[in-house]
């Protein structure tokens, strides 16, 4: 049975605010603040528990080895000798944002009937460019079953940021769908991170049907306002596209093509007159998980910042009170991740698959989350002040914490590959 599984990145013990992503306004604003890795990881676990309570199937991806000593060695240095900016880039816990791990095309959409995953190269930001080898190792373990085809990264310089710039619409998860690849060309002062040639390469490699594959440009205004990924201004699920009015460069053409490819599509657009791009981005209204519950109803899993932004919450309450397709609002607290620009949807990678074909070490129930929470509570640093990243004691604690988690989960084979 094909089901949507949300794989959340466990927030790693090195989570800190180094402000490494220009164009990501939250990360830039919080640069130099003290982070709270333990609280951050527990917030992520609480979100997973809330998803389980909604009846959703939940998976995990694991924190990466940080600092990335292999990457520093390739740069001809080591953590102790590296300049501060390289230390910060090697230490970032950014692999937590699993929406950037890979692009996923479920089996009903592909020519060979397998679920295809392409690991994202993330080449635009130095601190993210070294995530893919470990992500690939985890994907190869989690999705080793022949039901899956796991691809390496698209070659540089074509930036690929994975599922954060990809949406899928389908009458139900197990039916053939329409896949939408959103790329950037210009972003005002900020980089466009998804190159159109990378999107095209992923679609070809996955064997998608060109008649059910759309390539859409993200609006320059959205990137310039801080929407460094499409999933900050749009999200899709089932037959519903939920998007900000200013998300796309040429929305009329996009909506026409989408309606031709999928006549039953329902487009829920939030007008700029009701919610400005600025409010949409600071509240992460669209970085919500839009999910189908077992009742068939759709729920939106939102960050608490969305409830705290009056224009956003008013729009949502009106939508739910009216006849809109989103029937239920669920609020989660992921404030530590949000402070680095990562909302509920950034933290998860959606994979439509039969859970029986996934390595069970990457699936969780309440008991496994209890075990993970115990390791986090006893090993994750309580806080990381800005100056602390040079402290060898902190670095040992971070490395020991990850090992303790991998021992608890039975994934030690991934350490010291
Ligand atoms: O790539 N933040 C991430 C946030 C990614 C959010 N993901 C999605 N929208 N899907 C980024 O900008 C900041 C980390 C730091 O500065 O240490 C960071 O990488």
Image (spheres, helix red, strand yellow):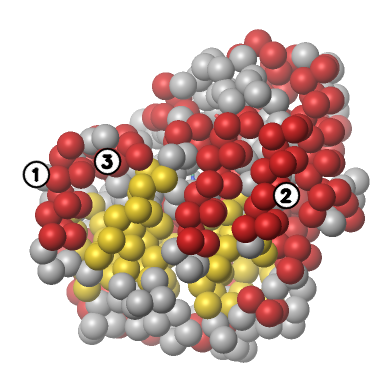
Side of 60 where 332 appears, left or right: left
Q: Quadrant of residue 363?
A: bottom right
Q: Are marks 1 and 2 in contact (CB under 8 Å)?
A: no
Residue 273, disc = 1
Residue named by callout 2: 371
How many numbered marks, from 0 up?
3
* Element assignment for label 3: helix
Left or right: residue 51 versus residue 384 is left
Determine the secondary structure under disc 1: loop
Disc number at residue 307?
3
Q: Nearer the viewer, residue 375 or 259?
A: 375
Tell us which disc is closer to us: 3 or 2.
Answer: 2
Residue drawn 59% across and 60% down? 7
User: In this view of the protein, which residue sits in the foreground, 303 or 254?
Assistant: 303
Q: Which label was assigned to residue 36? A: none
Q: Compute the Cα span from label 3 to label 2.
A: 31 Å
Q: Quadrant of residue 300?
A: bottom left
Residue in view at x 50 percent, y 49 percent: 47
Q: Residue at x 50, y 67 (%)?
A: 56
Between discs 1 and 2, the one toward the N terminus: 1
Name the N-terminal-most of marks 3 and 2.
Answer: 3
* 361, above or below 333, in the image: below
The reply to whether callout 3 and callout 2 are in contact (CB within 8 Å) is no
Residue drawn at x 22%, y 69% is 325
Q: Residues within 10 Å of mark 1 (few under 14, many from 20)?
A: few
Q: Is residue 348 visible?
A: yes
Left or right: 106 with respect to 399? left
Marks 1 and 3 sit apart, C-alpha to C-alpha, by: 18 Å
Q: Secondary structure at mark 2?
A: helix
Which of the pair 47/175 is nearer the observer?
47
Q: Position of residue 250 (x, y in %)?
A: 22, 59
């Amino acid at each position: 049975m094909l089901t949507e599984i949300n794989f959340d990145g466990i927030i790693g013990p090195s989570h800190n605010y180094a402000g490494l992503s220009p164009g990501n306004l939250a990360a830039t604003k919080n640069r130099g603040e003290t982070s709270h890795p333990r609280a951050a990881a527990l917030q992520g676990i609480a979100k997973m528990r809330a998803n389980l309570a909604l009846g959703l199937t939940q998976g995990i991806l694991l924190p990466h080895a940080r600092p990335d000593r292999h990457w520093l060695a390739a740069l001809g240095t080591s953590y102790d000798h590296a300049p501060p900016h390289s230390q910060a880039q090697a230490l970032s816990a950014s692999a937590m944002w699993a929406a950037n791990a890979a692009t996923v095309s479920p089996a009903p959409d592909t020519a060979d009937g397998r679920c295809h995953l392409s690991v994202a190269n993330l080449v635009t930001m130095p601190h993210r460019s070294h995530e893919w080898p470990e992500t690939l190792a985890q994907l190869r373990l989690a999705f080793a079953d022949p039901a899956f085809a796991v691809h390496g990264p698209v070659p540089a310089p074509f930036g690929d940021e994975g599922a954060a710039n990809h949406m899928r619409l389908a009458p139900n998860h197990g039916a053939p769908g329409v896949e939408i690849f959103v790329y950037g060309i210009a972003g005002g002062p900020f980089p466009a991170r998804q190159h159109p040639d990378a999107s095209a390469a992923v679609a070809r490699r996955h064997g998608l049907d060109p008649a059910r594959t759309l390539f859409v440009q993200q609006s320059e205004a959205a990137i310039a306002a801080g929407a460094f990924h499409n999933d900050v201004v749009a999200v899709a699920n089932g037959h519903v596209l939920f998007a900000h009015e200013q998300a796309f460069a040429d929305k009329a053409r996009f909506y026409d093509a989408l309606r031709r490819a999928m006549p039953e599509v329902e487009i829920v657009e939030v007008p700029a007159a009701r919610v400005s791009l600025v409010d949409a981005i600071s509240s992460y209204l669209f970085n919500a998980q839009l999910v189908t519950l077992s009742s068939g109803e759709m729920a939106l899993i939102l960050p608490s910042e969305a409830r705290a932004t009056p224009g956003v919450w008013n729009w949502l309450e009106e939508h739910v009170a009216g006849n809109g397709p989103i029937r239920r609002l669920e609020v989660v607290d992921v404030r530590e991740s949000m402070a680095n620009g990562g909302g509920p949807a950034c933290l998860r990678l959606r994979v439509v698959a039969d859970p029986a074909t996934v390595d069970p070490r990457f699936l969780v129930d309440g008991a496994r989350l209890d075990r993970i929470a115990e390791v986090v509570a006893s090993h994750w640093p309580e806080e990381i002040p800005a100056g602390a990243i040079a402290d060898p004691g902190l670095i040992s604690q971070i490395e020991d914490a990850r090992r303790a988690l991998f021992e608890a989960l039975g994934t030690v084979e991934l350490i010291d590959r």
